[in-house]
Amino acid sequence: MTCALTEAVVSRREENYAVAGESLLNRVTSTSPAETLYYLARPVLPVSVRRHLQQARLRGWQNIPFPQWPVDTSVDKMLRDAMGAMLRCTGAATVPFIWFWPDGAPTCTMVTHDVEGKTGLDFCQTLVRLDASFGITSAYQLIPESPDNAWRYADAIRARDCEVNLHDLNHDGRLYRDRETFLTRARRINDYARQYGCRGFRSGAMYREQAWYGAFEFAYDMSVPNVAHLEPQRGGCCTVLPYFVNGLLELPLTTAQDYSLFFILGDYSVDLWRQQIEAIRAANGLISVITHPDYLVGARERAVYVELLRLLAKLRDDGDTWVALPGEINDWWRQRDEMTLVQSGSCWKVEGAGSERAHVAYASLDGDRVVYSLDRAA
């Protein structure tokens, strides 16, 4: 990539751009005293009260022009356009590259569950069985300093072949309050990662500061939304593909959270999820799903989630997605990053660890469009 393209890609991925569309209420309630007050009261606030507070805070989100709702693929488009420019400048018919996903899968899907309280913890095994009924294993993020002793549930979850990762430190909204606070808490988070054998992390409420990720010692993070219009911290990474930040692999959130869908938008259908999934599929990206056991206890919410599982299972059964755990995606993406393309006569092949699952892909021009094709024999 040229320096200018690299700078533009990194700027969007790491959210180094001005965030438009912040209302006065959003700015006021994003200050530390307001956030501290909210998180102190949060455990005793019913969902109905929290919903009204958050709806008021997020008012006007529909008018935010960038990142583009409901899925922003501007980074992926930049890279695709760069391939097009290379083809036009060189006159080459194709540009080879290593396909994004193993075994030639068009997309990848990961299902994750962030567990917030006792209600969610007690519902985990029911959710494990529900996912398994569709042939899906999921990742559960548990709060290490939970007042409910969340980690006593970890062994039972792992016994069902699910993954367990860290969810913040104590979910009080203050992890990224300032650099000193962050570094102190990051050391404790790293200690818990070693103690509990966790390789992945997601922050509470999707708070993040990607420039500080070098302090973490785990392998992958899942805290950066593709579009963060409905999150407390606005922004978004503008890509539906994993990317590296200071050696940490970011697996971005590319679909709306269940809480946002049900309680902010008041939408009890899979229509938005379906729209987002189609946009992600068009970019051969990662379909990343977050739900919360705490909010799937109700029959109405659970019925919508079942429809989502049915949709994802059909994509898998039709050969349209690779359903994987975050740890499996991390392993693949790191292997792919170390693989090399080697020309053999008029053909190309992939070499390196894991290359038996890799495919050579080709970018070519179809009129003004850049299209991808796979060499299934590679």
Image (cartoon, helix red, strand yellow):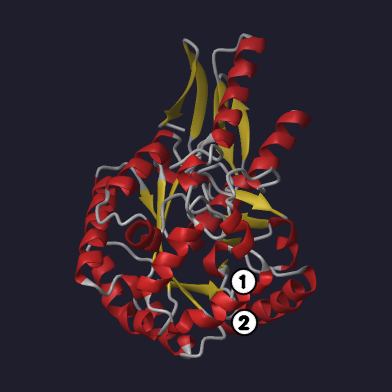
Foreground residue among 150 and 107: 150
Q: Could you say where residue 163 lies in the image, as x and y percent from the top left?
A: 44, 71
User: Which residue is labeled 2 in the image?
Assistant: 192
Q: Real-space Cα distance between discs 1 and 2?
A: 29 Å
Q: Could you say where residue 134 lies in the image, as x and y percent from the top left?
A: 23, 61
Q: Residue furthest front?
A: 24
Residues under numbered marks 1 and 2 in contact, where contact means CB atoms less than 8 Å apart:
no
What is the quadrant of residue 305 in the picture?
bottom left
Establish if 284 lies above or below 245: above
User: Which residue is labeled 1 in the image?
Assistant: 34
Tell me if residue 167 can be seen.
yes
Foreground residue among 59 and 182: 59
Q: Could you say where residue 207 lies in the image, as x and y percent from the top left?
A: 60, 63
What is the quadrant of residue 176 in the picture?
bottom right
What is the secondary structure assignment of the residue under circle 1? helix
| In-image side of 264 versus 310 (left or right) | right
What is the quadrant of residue 91 in the picture?
top right
